[in-house]
Image: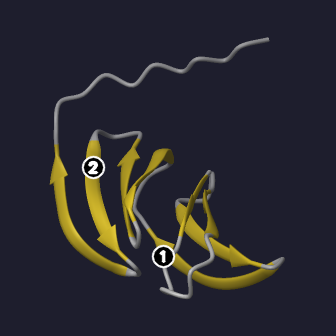
Amino acid sequence: MTLSDIDDDGLCELIVGTDDYSIRFYKDEKDLSEISENNKIVLLQPLGNPRFVYCLENGTMGVYNKLDRLWKKKVKIFYFNFNLK
């Protein structure tokens, strides 16, 4: 999960990566939009409104500007699951 102002209204929206390969956007408990990916989302990080970076479990990473993908590339990265219990 992360926060970013994807609709340029001055308020941050909640961005959530789901286990069913989607990135969902919420504002005031309302589902604004959804982007489908081809693998599990493991990282979402704001880059400055309205951009954010995402990483998938298969090593793909990319950048979105609002709901538009600017860049996507499969990279050799290692994903560490920091499950703190």
The image quadrant of residue 68 is bottom left
Q: Position of residue 15 (x, y in %)?
A: 59, 63
Q: Position of residue 7 (x, y in %)?
A: 51, 86
Which residue bears the numbered disc 1?
Answer: 35
Q: Residue type at mark 1?
A: Ile
10 on left or right of 52: right
The correct choice, above or below, for 42 with respect to 44 in the image is above
Q: Residue furthest right?
A: 29
The correct choice, above or below, for 16 with respect to 8 in the image is above
Residue at 39%, 25% in the rendered image: 79
Between 24 and 27, the one lying in front of the other is: 27
Image colouring: secondary structure
The correct choice, above or below, for 27 with respect to 45 in the image is below
Residue at 17%, 47% in the rendered image: 74
Res 61 label: 2
Between 77 and 65, the one lying in front of the other is: 65
Question: Which circle's residue, 1 or 2, is located before the other in the chain?
Answer: 1
85 on left or right of 47: right
Q: Residue type at mark 2?
A: Met
How packed mark 1 is, by other alpha carbons closer than 10 Å (few <14, some 14-19, many 20 or more), is few
Q: CA distance from mark 1 to mark 2?
A: 14 Å
Residue at 79%, 11% in the rendered image: 85
80 on left or right of 15: left
For label 1, the SS is strand
The image quadrant of residue 84 is top right
Q: Residue furthest front?
A: 10
Q: Position of residue 45 (x, y in %)?
A: 44, 48
For label 2, the SS is strand
Q: Position of residue 32 (x, y in %)?
A: 65, 86
Residue at 33%, 40% in the rendered image: 58
